[in-house]
Structures are given as C-alpha cells and as structure tokens.
Image: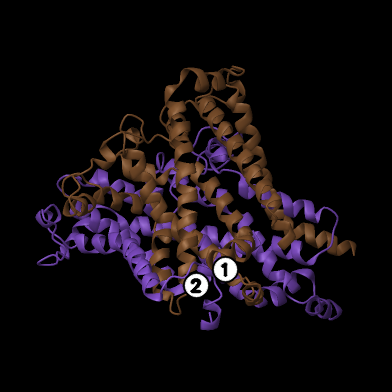
Amino acid sequence: MSPVRISHLALPRLSQAAITVVLVVAAATMLLPFVWLALSALKTRAELVAVPPVWIPEVPQYQNFALVVRQVPLFRYYLNSFIVAGGISLSVLITSSMAGFALAKYQFPGRDLVFRGILATMMLPSFIFIIPVYYMMKHVPFAGGNDWAGVGGTGFLHSRLSLILPFAVSAWGIFLMRQFMLGIPDSLIDAARIDGASEMRILLGIMMPSVKPALATVGIFTFISQWNNLFWPLVVATSAPELATLTVGLKFLETSFDPNRNAHLILAGLTLGILPVMILFASLQRYYVKGISMTGIKG
Amino acid sequence: MKSRTRAAWLFLSPTLLFYAVFLIFPVLSSLYLSFHEWNMLTPPLQAPNVGLANYRYIFSEDPVFKKALLNTFIYVVVTVPVSITLSVLLALMLSRKRRTGFYRLAFFLPTITPQIAVGMVWRYLYRPNYGLINTGLNAVGISSINWLNDPSTALLSIMITAVWAMIGTNLLVVDAGLKDIPDEYYEAASIDGAHGWQRFWHVTFPLLKPSLLFVFVTGTIAAWQVFDFIVAMTAPTLGKAGGPVNSTMTMVLYMYQTAFEYLKMGRASAMAYVLFIIVMVISLVQLRLFRRGGIESYY
C-alpha cells in the first residue's frame, strides 16, 4: 500500500510508535509458542521442567528427534498425509475446474440454482455426514472382501479411498474457480469454437492455462486444510491404524511417550509434525493468502 | 446451443454425482437414523424405530448433552466476536505500516498449524507447575492458575488458545476488505470534515461489512464444530476428552464419543441434527441481519 493511503485510514490518531509497540507485542504473542516449542524440542527432560524456566538448552539434544522417529512411525504418517491431502487436492482441482467452467461460461436452464445449491452446502456442518459415510465406506460392494451386497469385508475402510473420497469435491474450490474463470474473455472461447475446438479442448487448452494462479491457490489451500484435518482421519484410523495421517499420529505421540517423563520427546515430535506444512506455507504463502482473501471479499 | 448445454451438464456431472452420494444421501440417512436405535452392526433398515426417543433422551435425560450444548454456545459467543474484534484492530494498525510481511507471517503461522498440534503445545504452556504461562504470571506477582485441570478455567483456557489461533484467518479477510475500500471515500470524508472514529464508523465499517459478514458466518459455523482443540488439550486419550468433569465437553466431541465409543448411532445422529439446525438457523439470521445492515446497498 502506498504511504499516502495510510493517512486516510480511520483510527483515532495513534502515533506510529504506539502502533509499532502493539503490533510487535501481538506478533511476539503469536510466535512465542513456536519458539518455545522449537527450543524445547532440543532440551533434556530436566531443562524442560526447570524452575525458573531454561530458554536455551545448554547442549542441544538433537538425538531427541532420532528417538522420536525410532519410536513413532512419523514418516509413514507424513506419507499417509501426503497421499491423502495430495489426492484430495488433485481431485478438487479437476472437479472444481470442470464445474467452475460450466457455471462461469455456459448459459443453461438451472445454472443459477445449481450454483446457489453448491454455495449453500458450505453452510452444512461436516459431521452430519460422518455416520452414514462411514457405513457406506464399510459396505462398498466388491471392495475390501465385501460381496455384491457389500457385506463380509471392510469395504474402503482399509484403503486410502475412504479418506480421499468424502472430500473429493469442494464447494469453495468450485466457487473460486468460477470467480477466476468469469474474468476470462468470452472472445477467446468463441475464437476457439470457430476453429472447431471441442468443449473439452477449450477447457484444457484455453481455460486451464489462463487460470494457473487460481489452480495454485485452490491446490495449496485444499492441501493445507486437508493436511490439518483431524476428525475424519481419526474416525477411519480407529479401525485402520495403518492409515493414520500426521494429525492422528501426533495424537498418538502421547500414547507412545509418557507425558510426565518424556515431554521433551513429545515436543520434538510436535516440532517435526509442524515443520512440513510450515515449509510449504512459507514457499507458497502468496497463493494461500489469495485463497482466503478472495473468498472473504466475494463471500 | 443444445450441445453446449449438454457439455455444461457433463462438466458438472462429477460434482453433482458426488453431492448426491456424499451429501444428499447421508443427510437424509442421518435424519432416518435419528429416529432409530442403531449400533452400526446390523443393517440400518432393520434398526428398530424409536420415534422421537433419541431427541427426548438427549434433551431431558442426558445432562452431558446439555453441558455440551452450553459449553459450545459459550465457546461460540466468546471466541468469534473476540477474535474478529482483535483482528479488525490489528488489520487497521497494519494498514498504517509500510512493511507488513513479518507481521502477516507471525499472525498466519497459528492458522496453518494443525489445531491438534497447537492444542498440544498450549497444553504444555498451561502446565500448572512449570508451564510458561504460570511462570509469566508469577513473575508479575499473580499466583499460579490450574488452567486446564480446574473445571472453572478449563473452557476459558481452550477459548484463549482458540482466539489466538483464529485471529490470522480473520485478519487476512479483513485486511483484504480494507484494501478494497477506494481512497476517494476517505478523501471525500475528509473534505466533509470527518475525523478518526467518524471516518471509521461512516466509511470503513460500512464498507467492511461484507468481509465482517464472511468471517462472522464462517467463524460461527466452524466454532460450533470445535473438536480438535478439545481433543488436543483435555486428555491424552480420547476416551477422557471433554474433562475435567465435562467442563470442556462440546457438541461434536460428544457426538463423536456417542457414535464411535458408545456405538449409539441413532442418538449421535439426533445430536448431529440438533447441531445442524442450530447452525442453519444462526447462519440465516446472521445473513439477514447483515443484509438489513445495508450490505446490498454497497455491493
């Protein structure tokens, strides 16, 4: 923002210094738990429970991380989370661009009704689906040892499909793709039609390359929110622990280590658990931020 | 023309199929289940019909459900307005600064970190003996508080963490809303002699209403479903989550326990429907209130 603009913004006159102080304190409050966590991951048990608190470990205990990884299959959790969040993101990207394209660039009876219906689903609390969806996943015919009637085996419950399928479409993703595609000139599409391009070809050859930033936004946003999802993976992991995602795995840390004796190891595990999504966020922040702010303005 | 209509429906078909299978069918199934007694082990169509007994039970015979309803209500009415107010103040201050990258990053870190990890870290910060928060309080002469272990402060502790974690998302939306306000409005207001708070109330606030509506509605929907923080902060094993003495029991957590620990699917479905109706009614009221507040006259 230009500095000229700043003077226009309304707040009772506060000095720049006062604003800086408040912001620095607020930012410190946000960062302190993370700093404390990262430092604590390198402490001995004694340092962690010392009174007065020890901030910087005297000798950084890097082996804490090795001890955690040896005891808890963190890499399996990473992999599970990666496959699940990646699979969902991919599926959301495909379904959202197709639906977004249809809703942005075609005139057909019922379009507005469909669009409004999709938006309305954002208001549905997700837990209302959980019980029937769990049952459906268990009783998919011919899957996981089931017979044609869906009885006898575990269906999709012991497969990652059970984690991916319920989130394969996102109303938010459709909404965002539609918003972006509205901005692409119709003349491009018309020109392609005159050249004899099929509708699918228009989507793949013209729309998709033009909305790359939107794809990045929807992809990264979906990935992070699914990576952080706990409720459904926890439900699935009760019967299939081998499918546990990282969020569920972090919960398991406290059954693997005694919180009274090995809190420093739990904290080391948490540090490792938080790290990947932070790195991802740091590198793709721009797209993530765009995702939130766009929905906010147009929501 | 007809072929384009067909193309549009084809592009929409994966989405519509998904909504039929994973949304409409489960929502109707949940309604059916809420009138039946079902343990998920028998086919649902053979489950005995118990009429309104599930609803009657949770409202008249189940003190834990009432506690969960009350706790969730308190959580919503405290965390949503507090976090929005704080984020508006911070966004206004940030708009007066030129370099905001560092602050933004600080405020967003909690929002991209899995809530389960945030909650677990904060549980260590809340520890009664050597937790950082009590150490800080002691340093300024306040005696230690038994934060998460005392039924009278446990919910408060969780709400503090939740507000801390929620500020970032709201801030981003409000920030984007602020940037959307044209400079000319402030110039015009200045010419008319508006200062400080006047400019805020007559220019910033009305033009920010769509963003505020968005964070208010989505924040409320999310807050009614609070689950991860409770699981992370109240018990090492999920079975005991919601303690001490149900002081942090919430709707979704109780639904989870009723369904997947006690296998009372009908009762859990009834709870899901109660929550569903609450969330729908509140969302509709919020939308209407804001519309009456003049959103449409600006957008």
Q: Residue at x 60, y 21 (%)?
A: B46
Label 2's element?
Answer: loop
Decide which of A246, B173 is in the foreground and name it: B173
What shade does chain B have?
brown
| Position of residue A21 measured from the top left corner of the image (x, y, whole percent) | 34, 70
* Residue B124 x/y as whole percent: 24, 50
Who's the residue at 55% across and 19% down the image?
B56
> Given contact means CB atoms under 8 Å apart, are the residues at marks 1 and 2 in contact?
yes
> Residue B130 has which mark?
none
Q: Which residue is outermost to the right? A: B1
What colouring method underlies this structural image? by chain
Q: Position of residue B171 (x, y in %)?
A: 49, 62
Mark 1 residue type: Leu
Chain letter, purple:
A
Q: Which of A70 and B171 lies nearest the eye of the viewer?
A: B171
Give the residue at mark 2: B95
Q: Label 1 lies in what chain?
A: B
Is residue A272 among what the camera can see? yes
Chain ID of residue with mark 2: B
Q: Are marks 1 and 2 on the same chain?
A: yes
Q: Nearer the viewer, residue B107 or A188?
A: B107
Q: Residue placed at 31% from the left, 65% from the top?
A: A28
Instruction: Give the class, few, some or many, for how many residues have Cα within 10 Å of label 1's Cα (few <14, many ≥20).
Output: many
- The secondary structure type at the circle numbered 1 is helix
Q: On the image, which quarter does residue B187 sit in?
A: bottom right
